[in-house]
Amino acid sequence: MSGKDRSPADTAERVRLQKALRESVILRELADILNSSLDLEPLLHALVKRTTELCEVERCAVWLLNEGLSHFHPTTYHVASSVLAEEIIQKAGAAWYRTSLSVDNPIAQRLVEAGGMLYIEDLRNEATLQTLAGTFQIYAVLLVALIREGQLVGFLSLDNPGQLGTFSPEQYQLGRAIGHQATIAISNARLYQHAQAQQMRAEHLIERARAIYQVAMAVNSGEDLPVVLRLATRHLVRVLDANSGLTLLLDADETTLRPVDKQDVGYTLPTASISLDTLPHFHTAIATGRPLLINAEQAQDEEITWLHQFNLKSLLVVPLMVGADEQGAHWDLPGEQKSIVPGRGEVELLSDAHCVGLIVVNYSRRRKPSSGQHAFAQDIAAQCGLAIEKARLLDATIQAEKRIHMALDTFLHTAEAVSYSTNIQVILHGVLEKTLAAFTCTRGTVHLFQPEEQRFELLLARGFTSEEEVRWLEEQQTWLNPANEQIFGFYQQVMNGHATLVNTEHRSGQPQIFEQTMVLAAPIIHHQHILGLLLLDRSRSAPQELPYQAICSFTSWDFTIVEGIAQLAGVAMEQVRWQQEAITARANEATMREADALKNELLAITAHEFRNPLAIIQGHSQSALRSLRKANTSKAALPPAFEERLVTIETQAKQLNNIVATFLDAASLNRGQISLQLATVDLEKIARQVIEDQANLVKDHELRYVASTAEAPYLIQGDQARLAQIMGNLVENAIKYSPLGGPVTITLSRTSPFIEVCIEDKGLGIPQEAQTHLFERFYRVPSIDSQARGVGLGLYIVAQLVQMHEGSIRVESSGILGEGSRFIFTLPSSDS
């Protein structure tokens, strides 16, 4: 037959096939794009662009749940045509990413209740979204849920700007398929982003360690003081993401400040020297020895002139302290204004501790440095203070320089180990070895924290004989896991996230418990959660390569370094955990997909294999019954029991045949092999036919249907056979679970633009805890009468068929015997 002889039906079929082929190609391309990259931004751009092409809409947007789990924000959108004026597009684009949708918004709830697909006829009629509809000209819109592990994590919105209308079944089907692919891809990309963020945190720590290392090397290599301070200021400005920085030295009279190098300032100071009397906040930082953040509204006197003259919003003033108590470690972190001396509580600076200068970090925008940046600033300040002290005091010892170099070298190597190792035990073993060498200790341990038991358990030990390890651990248990208040202070200090020195504890009327002990304990933490503990031992009883008097005390520098090492170890442990969880999540997802495919295949094969033998059994039983009944009319009548057995065989064969049909339907649904034969059908006629068919089979039940008075018939676009299957299954269930008889009623009503069908009985009822699982595959209510047979697929098939008709289904039941249940499904009417 030539092309000219094709019928209109052939031409339409050819067009339909071409369209289906195009959609299949774009879907496959979209799947390839979504699976080819873990970079979220280009992935989302490709998703919205392809979705507009595939679903033949002019605009598509992706809304994702924020980290606080409180709002959905538009992440990416694409407009495929120039229906809107350019100025409208520009105005909408500027405001688009400032919009949000609360998770408590009724639209989000309706989207979940609608099974993941929600059509809104006109968004301007939604009270909570009228502003959004007006600003972006979103009228008729189709929302596609992105649901991951039962949680709504976002949704796609499809619309034609400034237009009303409906969406075709093909658009619904494609939207659902795209939403499923997009959910998996977005979840994988976010998981990858989180792992990258953990890696970035480790890299930031490495960057800071390298900066500290470079400054310390400059200090110890004999560089001139201005060179060291310029290097330190540049690193501080870069790591703190500031605009500029300035190092000021405090003159001997301790009343004026002068810049070290004017070339490093970036602007001209009002005077060569600055009086502290005009800088009250600077004076406070020097007096307390703690970093201080000054915002523009807090400035006073000359500080106001300084900030306004150079258009600054914030200043971070970092004092350069020398001569502090070597056993005191001082912090000034946000929200934690305390000075801690391990084992002794809060103290003031000693009289010989003094400030020799300041580093002022300048921000053109208002900023709040993080606790890590505060710590880094203090580390840099400590180096600068050391450099200034070394320049003023030429008798600094070679031993002190060596110890600082070794500590920083350990810090750097530990940070580098975090970035490439994936074995927690190997990482912690390396941390312990290098830390012991840097701190001139021969013994140490690493413990892991058990949060359920609130206890520390030994993981690694170094430098002990078997007998020494047992005895040493018994001694440490008295404070590691304290049973009374006697030595609770060390444990509390560690649990608060601070390094502490375990040594002689003086208490009134109590013995000196740790008379020979000198143990530095540093908690391994991540995001304020205790993961473990690093212990370094310099006790008198420990074997030492150097005289005890030369190494017994831990300095404040030791505290700073060991806390940094412990924090890096915490980052490493958390990073490895996330990597393992990511691998497990990917493996579990692949296994679930494979198991689901095998289960569907098994259902299909089993059902097909059962069908032929059951047909033979049923045919032979029916034939035997007919022959028996003919024989009973003659003189050679057979016993009645023989006929009862044949009836039982026929009944059970029918039951098995129904189960096989159910298996085949479930397998076809799972494979997407069921298609609807759509036509205009009358739900009232279907309800009447279902009632008539069932009335011929039951005697104890009153079956009826009620159609509320309506202006138009109950017409929908649907598959008549599948709609009869839905109603028939629900009516059969109502009869089955009403063993004592009672009425079963089908009620039809109209709620524009939907038609609602309710099947109600007065039977056993359904417990509340079972109702959320009722439409899942193979689920059967445990407390339901065991005489009512089934495989747990009927309601699953009903729910799937309702969704294929773009409807929704729910159940209402108090779970009380005699009050029964109401199954309600809603379908869009053909005139909506």
Image (cartoon, grey):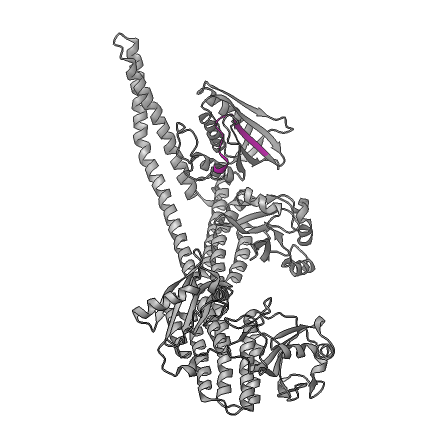
Q: Is residue 817 above or below residue 578?
A: above
Q: Is residue 490 left or right of 300 when viewed as pictured?
A: left
The N terminus, quarter of image: top left
Between 204 and 34, the one lying in front of the other is 204
Q: Is residue 196 visible?
A: no
Q: Nearer the viewer, residue 203 or 685?
A: 203
The residue closer to the viewer here, 214 or 67, is 214
Q: Is residue 285 magenta?
A: no
Picture quadrant where residue 87 is located: bottom right
Residue 763 pos. (x, y %): 49, 26
The quarter of the picture where residue 470 lies is bottom left
* Residue 283 falls left or right of residue 521: right
Image side of residue 312 versus residue 818, left or right? right
Where residue 740 appears, as percent x and y from the top left, is 46, 21
Nearest the viewer among 826 and 364 is 364
State the image coordinates of residue 170 (x, y, percent, origin top left): 52, 45
Q: Is residue 60 above or below residue 633?
A: below
Q: Can residue 828 be seen by looking at this rendering? A: yes
Q: Quadrant of residue 381?
A: bottom right
Tell which residue pokes out farthest to the front in this image: 509
Question: In this view, which residue lies farthest toward the bottom?
Answer: 394
Residue 757 belongs to magenta span? yes
Q: How many marks?
A: 0
The magenta stretch is 755-769
Tell me which residue sits at (55%, 30%) in the image: 758
Q: Is residue 817 shown above or below 487?
A: above
x and y percent of residue 677 in the render? 48, 36
Screen quadrant of the C terminus: top right
The outermost residue toward the top is 635
Q: Residue at x 37, y 49 (%)?
A: 594
